[in-house]
Image: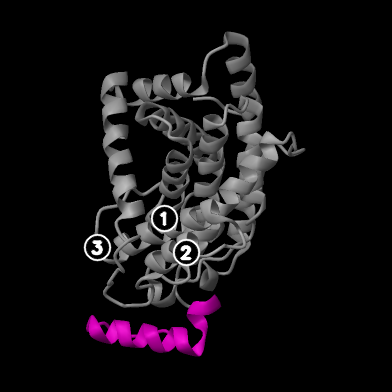
């Protein structure tokens, strides 16, 4: 595995090979699985991503706690029947991110990419891109490999865990991976992939994890809609030639250090932030009561 983004950049440029080929080689060395097997598994994951990103666009969702029901459908209708401030393309991508979180809340199948709490971002980025640019299934698999490569370096220096690093570690990581994938799909350079990934983390550095009742629903769903937008603007900035003066792995290290300074109440405990509000705590008590679990957390 590569140690730094500069090492990756220099190797890719020196050998004139696409980044995703190295990702396959690393996975082959780590697991012993063939390229054919790896691509087959990613193809299956891509199918799950497409289904989760689109299933609740036309039909309103119904989830167990009913905190986020129908958001994907409402956003989809708004995107297609109005003139969204952010444009139809971005609004539809937001709807796709909502859809995956609603699938998760309804106990459906998702791809944790890299976590369940951030599972709407990469699917929304890839599927909205496919819808707009009509790219092939194989191109999307290559883009997933690029996202994995970004994630491998991120995981080396930081964390994907909201309990360990806050929501920045979940939706920030997913947005960085998605930004890299989008830059690749638009023909960007290996340098631009890591600039865009850096921007995506910088945009949410310090973002807390404060799920009401500890459920991956509220405010997680909004963070996913924001996350795919973050990935898109990060990709566009990198493609425009804007650069990050801090290398990607150092940005990741900063994210980890920031996460460690967050108090436990703001790291997925369901105690602080919006989870700690009167309404949030009322929902928590109702949820725990419905599960016959005692609530020993003081307000």
Disc 2: CA contacts within 10 A as few (<14), some (14-19) or many (>=20): few
Residue at 23% from the left image edge and 80% from the top image edge:
291
So how many labels did they put on this image?
Answer: 3
In front: 3, or 190?
190
Q: Which stretch did the figure color magenta?
A: 272-299
* Residue 163 in view: no
Mark 2 against mark 3, which lies toward the viewer?
2
Pointer 1 or 2: first along the chain:
2
Q: Which residue is mark 2?
A: 81
Q: Residue at x 24, y 84 (%)?
A: 290
**Disc on res. 107:** 3
* Magenta-colored stretch includes residue 241: no
**N-terminal-most mark, 2 or 3:** 2
Q: Nearer the viewer, mark 1 or mark 2?
A: 2
Horizontal side of 52 relative to 188 (left or right) equals left
Q: Which mark is residue 275?
A: none
**Which residue was labeled with disc 1?**
96
Query: How many neighbours does mark 1 have within 10 angstroms: few (below 14), some (14-19), or many (20 or more)?
Result: many
Dot 2: what SS? helix
Residue 287: quadrant of the picture: bottom left
């Amino acid at each position: 595995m590569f140690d730094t983004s500069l090492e990756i950049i220099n190797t890719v440029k020196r050998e004139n090979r696409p980044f995703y080929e190295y990702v396959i080689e690393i996975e082959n060395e780590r697991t012993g699985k063939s390229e054919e097997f790896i691509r087959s598994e990613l193809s299956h994951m891509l199918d799950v991503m497409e289904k989760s990103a689109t299933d609740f666009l036309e039909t309103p969702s119904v989830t167990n706690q009913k905190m986020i029901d129908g958001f994907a459908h409402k956003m989809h209708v708004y995107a297609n029947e109005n003139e969204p401030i952010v444009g139809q393309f971005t609004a539809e991508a937001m709807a796709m991110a909502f859809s995956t979180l609603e699938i998760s809340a309804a106990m459906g199948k998702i791809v944790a990419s890299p976590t369940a709490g951030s599972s709407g971002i990469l699917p929304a980025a890839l599927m909205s891109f496919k819808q707009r640019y009509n790219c092939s299934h194989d191109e999307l698999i290559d883009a997933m490999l690029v996202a994995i490569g970004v994630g491998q370096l991120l995981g080396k220096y930081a964390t994907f865990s909201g309990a360990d690093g806050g929501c920045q570690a979940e939706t920030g990581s997913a947005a960085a991976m998605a930004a890299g994938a989008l830059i690749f799909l638009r023909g960007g350079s290996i340098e631009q992939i890591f600039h865009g990934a850096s921007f995506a983390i910088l945009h949410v550095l310090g973002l807390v994890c404060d799920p009401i009742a500890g459920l991956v629903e509220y405010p997680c769903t909004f963070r996913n809609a924001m996350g795919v937008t973050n990935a898109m603007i990060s990709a566009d900035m990198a493609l425009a030639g804007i650069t990050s003066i801090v290398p990607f792995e150092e940005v990741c290290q900063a994210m980890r250090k920031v996460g460690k300074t967050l108090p436990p109440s703001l790291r997925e405990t369901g105690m602080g932030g919006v989870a700690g509000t009167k309404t949030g705590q009322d929902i928590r008590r109702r949820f725990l009561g419905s599960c016959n679990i005692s609530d020993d957390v003081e307000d």
